[in-house]
Image (tube, rainbow, N blue to C red):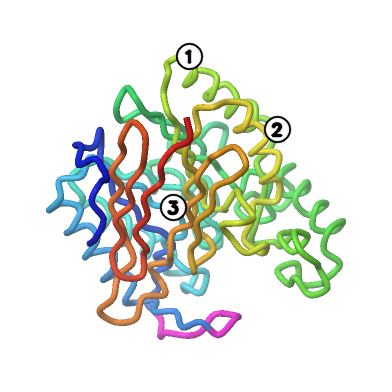
């Protein structure tokens, strides 16, 4: 498991991370790009992760989204999601979930959020928590404005369809053909943060600044183009980062969605870490991690596919 803190200090808090389990009781297959996906094995990855986190006596766990795959037969969706949630609940502490596109392929929001124990705000899956006085965690709902998860006539669905109609000329709105560069993010399996959530984010960051807290932002969709492929970015990642950059409190943004993973440091010194997917672990291999938080850095110790990384904060 690798890295040791450069200063050998005891962390303020330690927690577990995993992303894109995408379990389904179906045979393995390949992604659109030909990458193997191991739908049943991902359950074993999660079980080994929970066992390890319990052994390490971590304080909490963050799941960065997509716990069940979109290919899961729809008559099994609720059973499959509850099965994975039950595995998470074997962890001896709180588990904080973010929602991803595959979650929403399986269940509409009103059914999904209670199963994941997400304290929804007007149907949104955004919330914040403070496990220790020095740190605040903010979980964003990247599918606030989205063509999936809401009813067909919901204002957020209609806004999303308008964006896709204007920005993606393909009949299949999950297809990026012909789109160039950053325009390739305008796909139906992505989404945006709406105005109300943006105002809420601003108020939480304002409060964290007053309390002198450092902040970790979690979102299924990546928020920085250098940490992710263009096709995986939040539609309005730039607007969200404009809000984040108004303050100096955000130190790290954690994400999933782009299964290969990635890391970058943006122009304001904020670290962006996209976690490698549990779904793409061949038999016997893993992708999960432990994060140690210090006052001046974050240390991610990854297992197998998940890379280890020390992220030193800019002052």
Q: Nearer the viewer, residue 189 or 138?
A: 138
Q: CA separation, marks 2 and 3? A: 22 Å
Residue 229 relative to residue 130: left or right: right
Residue on which disc 2 sits: 195
Q: Quadrant of the N terminus?
A: bottom left
Which segment is the magenta one? Answer: 26-34
Residue on which disc 3 sits: 64
Q: CA separation, marks 2 and 1? A: 23 Å
Q: CA separation, marks 3 and 1? A: 27 Å
Look at 39% across and 65% down and name the residue there: 21
Give the dominant element type of the magenta stretch: helix, strand or loop: loop
SS for callout 2:
helix
**Residue with the most extreme left position:** 55
Q: Is 32 colored magenta in this rendering? A: yes
Q: Position of residue 145 (x, y in %)?
A: 68, 46
For mark 3, does the 10 Å Cα neighbourhood hold few (<14), some (14 to 19), or many (20 or more) residues?
many
Q: Are marks 3 and 1 in contact (CB under 8 Å)?
A: no
Residue on which disc 1 sits: 210
Residue 305 relative to residue 222: left or right: left
Nearer-N-terminus badge (2/1) = 2
Look at 70% across and 39% down and name the residue there: 239
Nearer-N-terminus badge (2/3) = 3
Look at 53% across and 40% down and name the residue there: 270
SS for callout 3:
loop
For mark 1, does the 10 Å Cα neighbourhood hold few (<14), some (14 to 19), or many (20 or more) residues?
few
Look at 28% across and 65% down and name the residue there: 303
Residue 309 relative to residue 3: left or right: right
């Amino acid at each position: 498991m690798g890295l040791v803190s450069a200063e050998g200090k005891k962390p303020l808090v330690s927690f577990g991370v995993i992303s894109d389990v995408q379990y389904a009781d179906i045979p393995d297959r390949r992604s659109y790009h030909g990458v193997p996906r191991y739908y049943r094995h991902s359950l074993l990855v999660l079980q080994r992760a929970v066992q390890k986190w319990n052994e390490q006596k971590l304080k909490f766990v963050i799941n960065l989204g997509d716990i069940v795959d979109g290919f899961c037969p729809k008559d099994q969706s609720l059973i499959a999601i509850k099965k994975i949630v039950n595995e998470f609940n074997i962890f001896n502490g709180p588990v904080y979930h973010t929602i991803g596109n595959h979650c929403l392929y399986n269940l509409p929001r009103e059914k999904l959020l209670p199963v994941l124990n997400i304290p929804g705000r007007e149907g949104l899956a955004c919330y914040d928590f403070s496990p220790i006085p020095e740190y605040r965690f903010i979980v964003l709902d990247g599918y606030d404005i989205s063509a999936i998860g809401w009813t067909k006539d919901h204002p957020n669905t209609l806004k999303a369809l308008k964006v896709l109609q204007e920005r993606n000329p393909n009949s299949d709105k999950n297809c990026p053909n012909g789109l160039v560069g950053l325009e390739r993010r305008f796909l139906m399996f992505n989404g945006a943060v709406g105005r109300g959530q943006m105002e809420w984010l601003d108020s939480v960051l304002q409060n964290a600044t007053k309390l002198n807290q450092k902040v970790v932002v979690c979102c299924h969709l990546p928020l920085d183009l250098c940490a992710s492929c263009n096709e995986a970015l939040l539609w309005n990642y730039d607007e969200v980062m404009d809000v984040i950059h108004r303050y100096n409190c955000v130190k790290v943004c954690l994400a999933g969605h782009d299964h290969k993973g990635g890391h970058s440091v943006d122009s304001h010194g904020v670290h962006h870490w996209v976690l490698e997917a549990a779904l793409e672990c061949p038999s016997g291999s893993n992708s999960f991690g432990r994060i140690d938080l210090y006052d001046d850095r974050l240390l991610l110790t990854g297992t197998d596919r998940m890379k280890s990384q020390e992220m030193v904060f800019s002052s």
